[in-house]
């Protein structure tokens, strides 16, 4: 009798593991289809950022960056900052907007979460402020995600600033 019970428990555990494996496969395929659709639309995935609801994608195409439901026009970006617990760690301001920079809006204030977890975010200022929340999942993971987002935005801003200095509109590719 004891062998029958042990066999039933083993069978139950096997079926449970099989269910978990098929669920993981389903979610992986769904994520792959989403990635393929983005790539087919001419967009590139710059970062997969873990959130409470799953993974959020920071995506770019030739003209925009996309974060959640926010579309950020690249040519309008004035400032990008890496924030740790709300404090700027690194910053880059677009030289082509230097004369009319409104300064710090203060729209993102520090949210005290205790000293145990450092929160890494990236502030992108264009027509409005967008906060890309890279999280506080183990310092290195969140830090690397914030750095990846910051570097992508800063690189695009530097490219556009070079075109501005040379009198070329990077968006249109012609002399201004």
Image: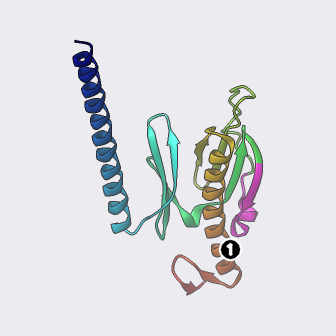
- Give percent across and percent down for residue 108: 66, 38
- Give percent across and percent down for residue 34: 34, 55
Q: Is residue 93 above or below residue 122?
A: below
Q: Residue at x 62, y 47 (%)?
A: 141
Looking at the rendered image, the quarter that the C terminus falls into is: bottom right
- Give percent across and percent down for residue 41: 35, 66
For the record, the magenta segment spans: 89-102
Tell me the element at label 1. helix
Taking the image as drawn, is residue 124 in sight?
no
Q: Which residue is mark 1?
A: 161
- Give percent across and percent down for residue 155: 64, 68
Depth check: give the residue in front, 149 or 1: 1
Disc 1 crowd rating (10 Å Cα; few below 14, some 14-19, many 20+) is many
Quarter of image, res 116: top right
Q: How many marks?
A: 1
Depth check: give the residue in front, 51 or 174: 51
Q: Is residue 71 above or below residue 169?
A: above
């Amino acid at each position: 009798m004891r062998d029958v019970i042990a066999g039933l428990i083993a069978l139950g555990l096997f079926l449970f593991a099989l269910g978990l494996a098929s669920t993981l496969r389903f979610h992986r395929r769904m994520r792959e289809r989403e990635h393929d659709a983005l790539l087919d639309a001419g967009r590139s995935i710059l970062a997969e950022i873990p959130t409470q609801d799953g993974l959020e994608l920071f995506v770019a195409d030739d003209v925009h960056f996309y974060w959640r439901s926010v579309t950020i026009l690249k040519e309008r970006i004035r400032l990008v900052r890496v924030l740790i617990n709300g404090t700027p760690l690194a910053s880059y301001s677009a030289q082509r907007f230097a004369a009319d920079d409104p300064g710090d809006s203060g729209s993102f204030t520090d949210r005290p979460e205790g000293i145990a977890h450092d929160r890494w975010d990236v502030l992108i200022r264009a027509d409005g402020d967008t906060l890309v929340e890279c999280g506080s999942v183990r310092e290195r993971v969140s830090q690397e995600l914030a750095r990846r987002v910051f570097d992508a935005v800063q690189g695009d801003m530097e490219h556009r600033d070079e075109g501005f200095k040379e009198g070329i509109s990077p968006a249109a590719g012609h002399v201004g």
